[in-house]
Image: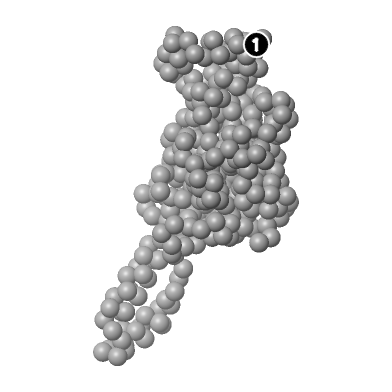
Amino acid sequence: MPGVSPTANPLLHRELIFVTGKGGVGKTTVAAGLGMALAAAGRRTIVCEVGAQRRLPALFGHGAGAPQDHAPDAREVHLGERLWATSIDPNRALREWLATQLPSKSLVELLTRSNLFQYFTAAAPGARELVTVTKVWELAQAKRWEKRAQPYDVVVVDLPASGHGVGLLRTARTFADVARVGPIASQAGRVRDTIEDPSRSAFVAVALPGELPVTETLELEDRVQRELRRPVDAIVVNALLPRRWAAADLEALEAGGDAVPAQARRAARSETARTKAQQAQLGRLRREALAPVVTLPFVPAPTLAREQVAALGDELVGKL
């Protein structure tokens, strides 16, 4: 299926696109769909999962992110033309970063296998988070830590749930401010500058059209502005029900009497009420949010297939 060209939308020319939202709202589907659409449009794209989920490779039939011969770095799984996926391992990312700072691989191995070093990295507040977000940033750099690895045009990041995702990104500023000098401060400062620059990164929040998810998304938007010193670029309302029944249709059903099964009338009333409630929350979000709000339709399937995710991604890119 041909991809949707993102050339008219500067949002999709950022180096990093962060996608977050509460658990269960479909943020992984949105991240995967965006990645697939951008790759189809000609951009060298990697979808980055923070954690060990490896859900995107599984969608492409690669199991638990098995290494592929196509990728210079075997941890970056080649899924298709111009599309890769990876899952950040903080310990491995730390070893990669240390290899750029220390004079020999043997010294890196000696240091990282030290019990004292392992204890320090586990106990140091924010260390794992800083390494994780720095590795995300590194994927888009012209000079990669791994000499043979090529940079990506865009990194789509499937962040942890809202609060954890913002905290993860905030660590770059925290370490840059605390360290002030030295390689950690320099690296953290470059990462912070990219995250907080709306011309280089984008922040996409995903929500469901319900009262609590909308309230949480508005709170997330406020937190991003306060803690990351940047706006949310777009809010995606996922799984929006279509408006199937006009008022006249419902009246006709009710007037049908025994000719219309009672179960059908109840189903129509229930769906209409749900749709009305969703539209009310969508309206509230559009009134109160600062970011533009776009929608994706409800897909009646327990598990989305690759083609469905790709279609949602194309639709989303066309709306952004």
Give the image quarter of residue 309.
Answer: bottom right
Q: Which residue is mark 1?
A: 104
| Position above or below: 193 against 100 | below
Q: Where residue 106 sits: x, y (%)?
A: 60, 11
Q: Is residue 286 visible?
A: yes
Task: Say how many tags the image has.
Answer: 1
Q: Where residue 74 sits: x, y (%)?
A: 61, 34
- Position of 171 with respect to 148 (left or right) is left
Q: Quadrant of the N terminus?
A: bottom right
| Position above or below: 150 against 293 | above
**Tag 1: residue type?**
Ser
Q: Is residue 235 visible?
A: no
Q: Where residue 307 sits: x, y (%)?
A: 56, 60
In this view, the residue in front, 58 or 310, is: 58
Q: Residue at x 63, y 17 (%)?
A: 99
> Mark 1: which secondary structure?
loop
Q: Residue at x 62, y 30 (%)?
A: 137
| Position above or below: 182 against 146 | above
Q: Where residue 144 sits: x, y (%)?
A: 69, 27
- Position of 246 with respect to 317 (left or right) is left
Q: Farthest residue toward the front?
A: 69
Q: Residue at x 60, y 22 (%)?
A: 96
Neighbour tally class for label 1: few under 14, some 14-19, many 20 plus, Cα within 10 Å: few
Which colour style is shown?
one colour
Q: Residue at x 43, y 53 (%)?
A: 208
- Position of 26 with respect to 74 (left or right) is left
